[in-house]
Image: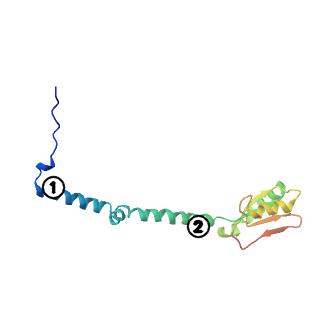
Amino acid sequence: MNAPALATTDRQTLPEWLRAALVIGRRDYVATVFSKTFFFFLFGPLFPILLGFVFGGVGSQIADSQENPRVAVIAVESEFDAIMEARSRLIELVPASQRADLVRFEPEPNGSALRARLLSGEEGFFVGVLDEPFGAPKFYGSVGDR
């Protein structure tokens, strides 16, 4: 038993003017869709979004750089507690934009190696290092850095 053939449109049965219109339509469609101008038309709205991400990242880096500077304090816990107590009483006298966060580090036998590590950024970024706060205090670093 033979199955009936599927109904197909024979190009020979189409009128000449319709075949010409289909050829022109197909040619124009391909020329339009695959043109550079059409790609810019489609992807053009993505450029402002892309720029928003780029400049948003730059803005967040600027905002991060506005954090309080950090100062490393090389001191035993009791000395650091005394510094933090004095800081808590005086903190309101210093504008918020000029305050520094203090981070304690335990003294090591080779103090110069610890200072070098702290100032080089191996332990995080510090604008300076305060050493021997109650003996002979020394500040290493740059007070002009933020």
Placement of 134 over or under 13, stated as above or below: below
Query: Residue under circle 1?
Result: 19
**What's the residue type where badge 2 is placed?**
Ile
* Neighbourhood count class around disc 2 (C-alpha, 10 Å): few under 14, some 14–19, many 20 upward: few
| SS category of the residue bearing label 1 | helix
Residue position for label 2? 62
Q: Which mark is residue 42?
A: none
Packing grade of label 1 (10 A; few <14, some 14-19, many >=20) is: some
Q: Label 1 vs label 2: CA separation?
A: 63 Å
Q: Which of marks 1 and 2 is nearer the N terminus?
A: 1
Name the front one of labels 1 and 2: 1
Residue type at mark 1 is Arg
Please tell me which residue lies in front, 119 or 80: 119
Question: 29 or 81, which lies in front?
Answer: 29
* 6 or 129: nearer the viewer: 6
Quick one: quadrant of the C terminus? bottom right
Q: Residue drawn at (18%, 56%), measured in percent from left and top?
A: 22
Q: Which residue lies furthest to the bottom in this view?
A: 144
- The residue under the point 11% across, 58% down is 17
Of 77 and 23, the residue lying toward us: 23
